[in-house]
Image (spheres, rainbow, N blue to C red):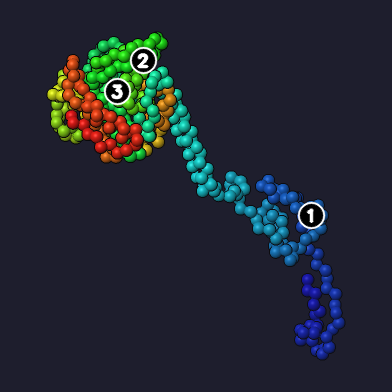
Amino acid sequence: MNDWPDDGGYGRGSANSQPEGPRRMSHVQRPQVPQQPPRRNDGQGYNPNFTQAQNQGYDSGYSSGQVYGGPQGGPRGGAQGGGRGTVPPQYTPQGPGRPAPDWRKRIKVGSIVLVVGVLAWGIGTYAWAGSQMRNEVDLSKVIERPEEGDCTTYLIVGSDSREGMSAEEKKKLHTGSAEGKRTDSMMILAACSSGNTMVSLPRDSWVTIPNFVGSESGKSYPARGGSKLNAAYAMDGPELLVRTVEFNTGLRIDHYAEIGFAGFANIVDALGGVELNIEKGFKDKKSGADFQAGTQTLNGEQALAFVRTRYAFAESDLQRTKNQQKFLSALANQAATPGTILNPFALYPTLGAGLDTLIVDKDMSLYDLGKMFFAMKGVSGGEGKSMNMPIAGSAPQGSLKWDMPKVKQLVEQIRNDEPVTVTSNR
């Protein structure tokens, strides 16, 4: 329908020079937009900002940035509209969008959990190992003891105990089947700030077994002169051995550690063997030793044969003590490392291999045991010295007589934490 006049009014070629007055235009009624139900804006279509008042009447959408007559679900109040002037949230097929995970926080929390777990496992391992130590030797029963010195002293004993060994193991390790146990090796380890010293005590040393009180019987026994050192252990065990060493040297023993055949071999195997340089090859049918000269890795069976061999040497007992010192230093050098002592995964199998035959005094802790191994490692690393007890000559029954002036000087230097200058002549 044309609302303009047919005569072409002002502005359309009219002959009339005056403009016409205002004319009323016919009102054009726009179609009514159907009412839209309130939509949700919480992921399920409901918009909490939508009110009934906002839903009444006609909204042209001007000044709001909305496009009139937009499709359903579009910018006009739909699920993507989010209300006037808002930025529509992004959606995924699984539901409303979520912030990306904070991987740095997750890694940090995971690391903390891992560290706590390892610490708990390590503490548990050390607690278990400490509870498994056989603290059986009561040094408080030792009478007439010397005064304490400035160094920490250990009496380290290797016994020929076959406790817990099967017939097959005894045959394999060439231990025989003798009942009971005797001392197969003895040495004093002095851990001093001036340097560590390891002194081997030949088991055939000619000494005096002093008067003592039986550790089990409680009876008093008189002194017994002219005996071999290993007889003290056979008579009344570790307490009398400590008493005899203290009586003949004048040096107080702070801790006692003893290990049997099986435990010794098992510890070596748990470490994966011990590397040792054997200067001269030797054989011994009784111990099972059969070694070539050179650097080689000894397993448990070979290690036990190495430290027990005596009949292959001219000075059987003295050479054996030297081999024992050499091997124990190499063992400590490999075992007493942070990678073993501070690592439960390495310490657990090592201790578990020898705890069943490791006997210590009642005051010795796992920490003290670790200090003992580190002191032995210091000797092998050149931070101390190893030697035999100074020998003056032979004594009855094929025994060895100590050089007492040198022994007294050696003990005095250890007691006062002085560098040891005494040397052994054999």
Residue projecting furthest to the front: 405
The picture places residue 267, in percent across and down from the top left corner, at 31, 26
**Mark 2 = which residue?**
212
| Circle 3: residue type | Asn
- Of residues 174 and 149, the one nearer the viewer is 149
**Mark 1 = which residue?**
55
- Which structural element holds mark 2? strand
Q: What residue do we see at 40% from left, 36% from top?
A: 342
CA gap between label 3 and label 2 equals 14 Å
Q: Say whether residue 323 is left or right of residue 117.
A: left
**Mark 3 = which residue?**
248
Q: Quadrant of the N terminus?
A: bottom right
Please say whether residue 106 is visible from this viewpoint: yes
- Which structural element holds mark 3? helix
The picture places residue 18, in percent across and down from the top left corner, at 83, 88
The residue carrying pointer 2 sits among few (fewer than 14), some (14 to 19) or many (20 or more) residues within 10 Å by Cα, namely: many
Q: Which label's residue is closer to the chain start, 2 or 1?
A: 1
Q: What residue do we see at 30% from left, 28% from top?
A: 188
- Which structural element holds mark 1? loop
Q: Which label's residue is closer to the chain start, 3 or 1?
A: 1
- Of residues 255 and 40, the one nearer the viewer is 255
The residue carrying pointer 1 sits among few (fewer than 14), some (14 to 19) or many (20 or more) residues within 10 Å by Cα, namely: few
Vertical comparison of 44 with 209: above or below: below
Q: Say whether residue 25 is left or right of residue 263.
A: right
